[in-house]
Image: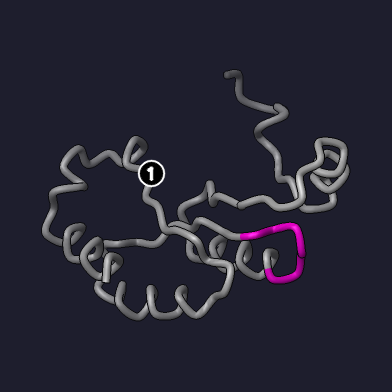
Amino acid sequence: MPTGESIVRRNYLPSDLASNLEAAGVTRTVLVQANQTQEEAKFLLDLADAVEFVAGVVVWADLQASDIGHVLDELLRRDKLVGVRHEVEDDPDDDWLIRDSSMRGLRMLAE
């Protein structure tokens, strides 16, 4: 895909989506975080709290972080959190899934 102005390379907010949802008869949707930052995770969760048609949010969290337990505790306090993901396909570390630090974070997430 060429860089620059593109239909998929821009921010979309609930106001951009509402009319399409209504036209399609969709009443609820799930936001899936695209950027791997805690700031975007918080932004999406706050946005979901403010919009009725957002049923849930899938966010990114650094599962290798030393404070991942605290981060997960904070995320789990959010009513609309429905999942946590890591973009393994974009990670330069081919062994990300089998690293001890990743396994520790994944175990904490499973609990």
Q: Position of residue 90 (x, y in %)?
A: 36, 37
* 88 displayed left or right of 98: right
Please tell me whether residue 22 is drawn above or below residue 49 in the rendered image: above
Name the residue: 81% across, 41% down.
25
Is 14 in the magenta?
Answer: no
Q: Please state, as top left, top right, bottom left or bottom right, where the N terminus lies in the image.
A: top right
Q: Amino acid at mark 1?
A: Glu
Residue extending furthest top?
2
Q: Secondary structure at mark 1?
A: loop
Please tell me whether residue 12 is drawn above or below residue 75 in the rendered image: above
Is 50 in the magenta?
Answer: yes
Please tell me whether residue 65 is drawn above or below residue 21 in the rendered image: below
Q: Which residues are magenta?
A: 49-55
Label 1: few (<14), some (14–19) or many (≥20) C-alpha neighbours in 10 Å: few
Name the residue: 67% across, 27% down.
4
Q: For mark 1, what is the residue?
A: 87
Name the residue: 68% across, 64% down.
48
Q: Position of residue 34 (x, y in %)?
A: 53, 46
When asked about the image quadrant of residue 108, the answer is bottom left
Give the colour scheme shown: one colour
